[in-house]
Amino acid sequence: MDLTTLALDLTAADPAGLDLTDPVQLDRTQAVADALLASGADLETLRRLEGDLIERSAAVPLVLHVAVKMAVSRCTVLALEGPAHVSVVFAVYKEHQRILPLDRVAGGEDFLVRKVAQLEWLLAGRDDLTWDMIVVDDGCPENSGGIAKDIAEEAGCADRVQVLMLAEAIAAGHPVTRPLTTADDSRKGGSIALGMWTAAETARENHVVVFTDADLSTHLGQTGLLMGEILEGGREAAIGSRREPRSVVIKQGVRNTRGKLFIYLWKRLIGNLPDIVDTQCGFKGFSAEAVRAITPDLLEKKFAFDIELLIKIRLRGADSIAKVPVAWIDSETLSTTTDIQPYLPMLQAMVKMYRIYLPANPGADEFAAFIAGLDDAAWNRLVENIPEEITKREPAEFGGFSGVSAADLGRAAGLG
């Protein structure tokens, strides 16, 4: 029996979807990944299986899609030459419910305990491959950081799970938090920068620093996909992408056209990332050396911090970033973000990045001036009147397509 048939037979009784709050379904992903690895399939065979499943995507249970990514990841990790260490960083803000298990709160994901288990599964059997985790409270009024600390102690993993409070770091004058004066001025970016810097401060051989989202959207069993690109592929960064041919994405809500506009606009500004489409996936890995170089003087402490990291990494080398197709499942039940992403503030932050990091050019200058001049009312009008030349195209085309001018968008926004 070939591996594809075996995999489909193995998961024939599994539901089509995957509930991130259901520990039984989440445990199934690991069981299926273990079965695929136990078949004796090598990395090349597992990657062929991955491609076969993508081609039949609609007929494949999500458990299997995630499991094959995990199997490829673990196979990659087992082939690494040790020693190596991975640090996983994430920020928490109003995560006081989602961090709890389902039997304590409806919609709970028990995400801290699950993330620890996912890393332990990935690195099991390799004493020379180690991990730690840094959780950063982003000024949460509900004390998410304190809850995380209690959970880590109860779970017996407090020796490897460090909890930082962004407000305390700001008060202490930590240089990575500048120019923040309060945690209220950070929306994730300030906390991620602090966590990444803290992780990279400790000298470790072959050290990879990964940041992810607090929720379970990206299974950390996929972390080996990032580690392999950095430790074996020689890249300074490996970024999870939801827009590659082998990506698996389950996303709730309708945000597609607004997201396309956002990508089209930032592509007109940021000329050194022509090959990258998904800048906002919360699953990115960096060499510790690169982290020490790029985090101390970040401009952006809010939601556009991802793209600043990528700009600075790319400035260090044309081949410094690897794109990694991932399995990503939207975590909506207790989401701490609204359906409307802060696209305009992010774009206006990117205008500042363009002007500081990149050489000026007339085309980008026109778009920079247009974006800087938008207010919320004009942005909303633009969202309601996005030109068809943008909506009918896929975001991957926007690196080479610039057929809609700033003036065209100005008219669509009612600016004349």
Image: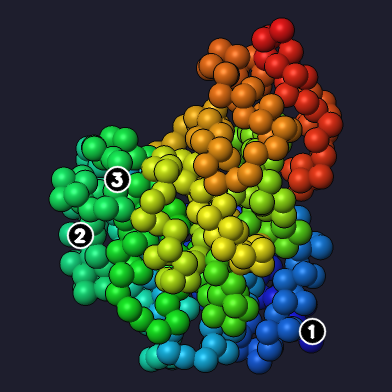
- In the structure shown, which secondary structural element does the residue marked by tag 2 occupy? helix
Q: Which disc number belongs to residue 2?
A: 1
Instruction: Tell me the CA gap for discs 3 and 2.
Output: 25 Å
Q: Are marks 3 and 1 in contact (CB under 8 Å)?
A: no
| Among the two numbered marks 3 and 1 on one chain, the one whose residue lies closer to the N terminus | 1
Residue 162: image x %, image y %? 24, 65
Q: Quadrant of residue 45?
A: bottom right
- Closer to us: 145 or 164: 164
- In the structure shown, which secondary structural element does the residue marked by tag 1 occupy? loop
Q: Is residue 264 above or below residue 251?
A: above
Residue at figure coordinates x 32%, y 35% from the top left: 185
- Quadrant containing the N terminus in the rendered view: bottom right
Residue at figure coordinates x 72%, y 32% from the top left: 362
- Quadrant containing the C terminus in the rendered view: top right
Q: Is residue 14 above or below residue 124?
A: above
Residue 375: image x %, image y %? 53, 16
Q: Is residue 277 above or below residue 35?
A: above
| Among the two numbered marks 3 and 2 on one chain, the one whose residue lies closer to the N terminus | 2
Report the residue marked by disc 2.
Answer: 149
Q: Quadrant of residue 85?
A: bottom left
Residue at figure coordinates x 66%, y 67% from the top left: 319
- Amino acid marked by disc 3: Arg
Instruction: Tell me the CA gap for discs 1 and 2.
Output: 46 Å
* Residue 13 visible, this angle: no
Report the residue marked by disc 3.
Answer: 178
- Amino acid marked by disc 1: Asp
- In the structure shown, which secondary structural element does the residue marked by tag 3 occupy? loop
Residue 335: image x %, image y %? 43, 40
- Neighbourhood count class around disc 3 (C-alpha, 10 Å): few under 14, some 14–19, many 20 upward: some
